[in-house]
Image: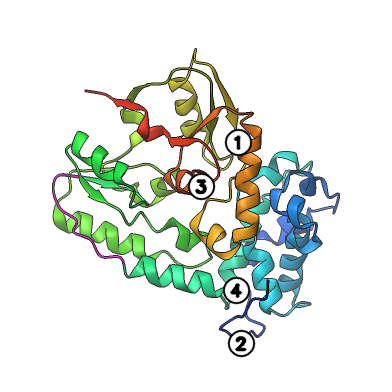
């Protein structure tokens, strides 16, 4: 697929990557990470592997490489799933290096420029005593907001902006609106949002779920990059139930699936195949919106029984 870029690229002063100089040099080039990378599995291109992105980051850091369209594409064609880190014998923080490299890039993919504009243009009332922050316009958000006596905010926390390598000023504006509106509690879902709401009375909706209503055998999809606390709480809800767990990335993050739809579709089908015919329960509305196009899928929130 031919890709056009809107920016002219020149060598820039490296900032964020400097923090990971020693981490980058720790890479021995063993290529164990390639075995776990779903993107590389489907493209078989070295630049699409974690090892390839480490080498590119090193080249940018030393000045041996100049930023161009192919470099931007390579560094962005990563779902940040962290599966590569699970097999790295040197325990390198590969995802953090890629995030740092993205932060230092001057150029953006056209799809990412569009996503950035759409997120930053999102305008919705922040009102009431309880605000339910969800990165989804799915009808389930409004249904849950009613159950929790909350006001729904469908614009999310803007985490995709940071994942693309840009400063998340959207979250700063949202937090300011929350404080000005006198919101007493913020409820969120995506673990990524927690860092933005640390100074607020915020709770993950997972803590408000008492039980799940299921009958039969299911496959529970939990992205590997979700924090351990969230994963353990999800697993506690399914304790004693007939479920299997899938921790692979489905390619559902908006910045990935919009920029790389072919790879995102293949990764979604990887998850569907791993389910072995079981109905899939996702733990991310972004993943749900993506996966439901390829298989029998519901989100955790569809089957949740809330406390009280």
How far apart, in angstroms, are the residues tagged by discs 2 and 3? 36 Å
The residues colored magenta run 122-130
Please name which of the two marks, 1 or 4, marks the residue nearer to the observer.
1
For residue 74, which quarter of the picture? Answer: bottom right
Residue 111 in picture, x, y percent from top left:
52, 70
Task: Report which residue position mark 3 lands on.
Answer: 293
Q: Is residue 301 above or below residue 78?
A: above
For residue 189, which quarter of the picture? Answer: top left
Among numbered discs 3 and 4, the one appearing first in the sequence: 4
Residue at point 37% right, 21% down? 213
What SS does tag 1 mark?
Answer: loop
Residue 266 in picture, x, y percent from top left:
65, 50
Among numbered discs 1 and 4, the one appearing first in the sequence: 4
Q: Quadrant of the N terminus?
A: bottom right
How far apart, in angstroms, are the residues tagged by discs 2 and 1? 38 Å
Q: Is residue 4 above or below residue 112?
A: below
Choose between 21 and 203: the one closer to the eye: 203
Q: Residue 126 magenta-drawn?
A: yes
Residue at point 59% right, 71% down? 104
Q: Say the numbered circle drawn on residue 8.
A: 2
Residue 50 in picture, x, y percent from top left:
73, 55
Q: Say the numbered circle drawn on residue 105.
A: 4
Kindly tell me whether residue 282 is visible in this rendering.
Answer: no
How far apart, in angstroms, are the residues tagged by discs 1 and 4? 30 Å
Q: Is residue 76 above or below residue 193?
A: below
Q: Say the numbered circle drawn on residue 247.
A: 1
């Amino acid at each position: 697929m031919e890709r056009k870029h809107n920016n002219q690229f020149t060598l820039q002063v490296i900032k964020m990557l400097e923090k990971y100089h020693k981490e980058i040099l720790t890479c021995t080039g063993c290529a164990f990470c390639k075995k776990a990378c779903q993107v590389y599995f489907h493209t078989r291109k070295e630049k699409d592997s974690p090892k390839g992105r480490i080498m590119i980051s090193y080249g940018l850091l030393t000045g041996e490489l100049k930023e161009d369209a192919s470099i931007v594409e390579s560094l962005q064609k990563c779902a940040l799933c962290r599966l590569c880190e699970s097999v790295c014998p040197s325990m390198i923080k590969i995802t953090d290096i890629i995030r740092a490299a993205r932060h230092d890039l001057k150029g953006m993919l056209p799809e990412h420029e569009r996503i950035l504009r759409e997120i930053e243009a999102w305008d919705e009332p922040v009102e009431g005593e309880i605000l339910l922050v969800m990165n989804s316009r799915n009808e389930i958000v409004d249904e849950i907001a009613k159950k929790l006596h909350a006001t729904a905010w469908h614009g999310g926390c803007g985490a995709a902006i940071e994942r693309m390598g840009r400063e998340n000023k959207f979250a700063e504006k949202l937090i300011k609106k929350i404080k000005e509106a006198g919101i007493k509690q913020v409820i969120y879902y995506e673990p990524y949002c927690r860092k933005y709401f640390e100074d607020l009375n915020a709770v993950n909706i997972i803590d408000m779920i008492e039980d799940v209503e299921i009958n039969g055998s299911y496959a529970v999809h939990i992205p590997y990059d979700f924090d351990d606390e969230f994963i353990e709480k999800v697993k506690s809800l399914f304790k004693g139930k007939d479920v299997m767990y899938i921790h692979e990335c489905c390619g559902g993050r908006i910045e990935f699936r919009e920029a790389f739809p072919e790879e995102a579709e293949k990764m979604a089908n990887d998850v569907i195949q791993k389910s072995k015919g079981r109905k899939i329960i996702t733990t991310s509305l972004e993943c749900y919106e993506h996966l439901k196009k390829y298989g029998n899928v519901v989100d955790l929130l569809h089957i949740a029984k809330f406390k009280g």
